[in-house]
Image (tube, rainbow, N blue to C red):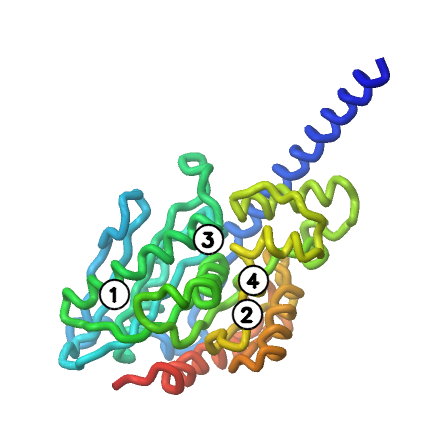
């Protein structure tokens, strides 16, 4: 009788943990989708980061497939000058909380980067939604990894041989960009020279994710953290948090855990009051880059959340720094 009661109690607790985990997964999704990372409704910079796109600047080729999935397509922006023997590629990955967004939303950014003489690419990836409940951050990162040879090959077919690249993105795209730059650079078809990103989550420690209550230290909050991070990683999280075993389980989606002395130069921007992904995580990343002596710059919106919407000066400095980084680490030949 006692065993039966204990069994029923354990089952009830597990169901409760699953319920809390699902609640936090959907809370996270709604928060992320509601974010506006670098999608300002007005332009405070007088068009400084936009370009009058026409054939004298470049051309765009859309919806080029890189795999069999419906979302597995990319857009390629190529400069008008196709006389060079080699070009740098800049990949920009879209935002959307891993559940929404589209490469077309970054057209202005991609045109601006292409206008500087680079081949630019926007890549779609399979989103986590009702049609694709199997999708997760890890599977999306693998899609990005698998797309790169196709992007490089297509550029070459169009007369733009790629010999080096940079990768970038905002929010969810920033997370995926960091993963490619840190985790997958060794398998890249061309050398990765740098990464720039804004407000992308780089690590997953419950104590940092306080806006979701994951730092509470209760059974419910622990279940929620396991549910959320497990869904993002595409696996069941079993290890105790803040242990080497946990780091190993979550490493596939934690850019922080791949930082070493060979990590590529990194430019990043974050908001101090970010309630979508934790500012504290960006501080961990900053510390790791410093300890490994990785060239980096970190821009902080002291008055902003996830969109860095209240620090236009900081955002402008970050955008101008992108060009400085490109001139330093991937200059036009």
Sequence-first tag of 3 and 2: 3
Q: Residue at x 52, y 73 (%)?
A: 268
Sequence-first tag of 3 and 4: 3
Q: Which residue is mark 2?
A: 259
Q: Which residue is mark 3?
A: 96
Image location of residue 125, percent across then percent down: 37, 51
Q: Residue at x 49, y 81 (%)?
A: 317
In the picture, the disc for residue 202 is 4
Q: CA distance from mark 2 to mark 1?
A: 25 Å
The local crowd at label 2, few if under 14, some if 14 to 19, many if 20 or more residues have their Cα within 10 Å, is many
In the picture, the disc for residue 291 is none
Q: CA distance from mark 1 to mark 3?
A: 25 Å
Direction top: furthest residue? 1
| Residue 51 in view of the camera | no
Secondary structure of the residue carrying numbered label 2: loop
The local crowd at label 1, few if under 14, some if 14 to 19, many if 20 or more residues have their Cα within 10 Å, is many
- Give the foreground label among 2 and 1: 2
Image location of residue 266, percent across then percent down: 49, 75
Q: Residue at x 46, y 37 (%)?
A: 133
| Residue 94 in view of the camera | yes
Direction right: furthest residue? 2
Asked whether the residues under the numbered discs 1 and 3 touch, taking CB atoms below 8 Å apart as contact, a structural biologist would say no
Between 214 and 85, the one lying in front of the other is 85
Q: In which quadrant of the rendered view does residue 129 lie? A: top left
In the picture, the disc for residue 152 is 1
């Amino acid at each position: 009788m006692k065993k039966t009661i204990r069994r029923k109690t354990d089952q009830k607790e597990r169901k409760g943990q699953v319920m809390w985990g699902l609640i936090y997964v959907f809370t996270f999704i709604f928060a992320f989708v509601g974010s506006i990372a670098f999608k300002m409704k007005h332009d405070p910079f007088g068009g400084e980061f936009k370009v009058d796109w026409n054939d004298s600047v470049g051309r765009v080729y859309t919806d080029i497939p890189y795999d069999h999935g419906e979302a597995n397509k990319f857009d390629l922006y190529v400069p008008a000058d196709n006389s060079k023997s080699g070009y740098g590629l800049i990949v920009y990955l879209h935002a959307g909380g891993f559940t929404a967004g589209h490469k077309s939303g970054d057209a202005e950014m991609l045109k601006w980067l292409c206008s500087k003489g680079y081949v630019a690419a926007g890549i779609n990836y399979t989103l986590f939604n009702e049609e694709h409940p199997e999708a997760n951050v890890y599977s999306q990162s693998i899609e990005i990894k698998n797309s790169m040879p196709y992007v490089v090959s297509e550029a070459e077919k169009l007369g733009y041989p790629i010999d080096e690249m940079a990768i970038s993105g905002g929010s969810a795209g920033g997370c995926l960009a960091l993963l490619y730059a840190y985790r997958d650079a060794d398998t890249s078809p061309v050398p990765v020279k740098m990464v720039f990103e804004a407000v992308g989550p780089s690590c997953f420690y419950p104590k940092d994710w306080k806006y979701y209550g994951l730092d509470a230290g209760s059974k419910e909050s622990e279940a929620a953290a396991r549910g959320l991070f497990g869904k993002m990683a595409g696996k069941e999280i079993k290890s105790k948090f803040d242990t080497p075993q946990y780091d190993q389980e979550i490493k596939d989606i934690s850019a922080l855990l791949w930082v070493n002395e060979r990590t590529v130069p990194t430019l990043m921007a974050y908001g101090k009051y970010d309630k979508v992904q934790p500012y504290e995580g960006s501080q961990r990343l900053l510390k790791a880059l410093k300890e490994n002596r990785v060239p980096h710059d970190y821009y902080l919106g002291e008055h902003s959340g996830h969109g860095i919407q209240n620090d236009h000066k900081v955002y402008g400095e970050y955008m101008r720094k992108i060009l400085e980084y490109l001139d330093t680490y991937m200059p036009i030949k």
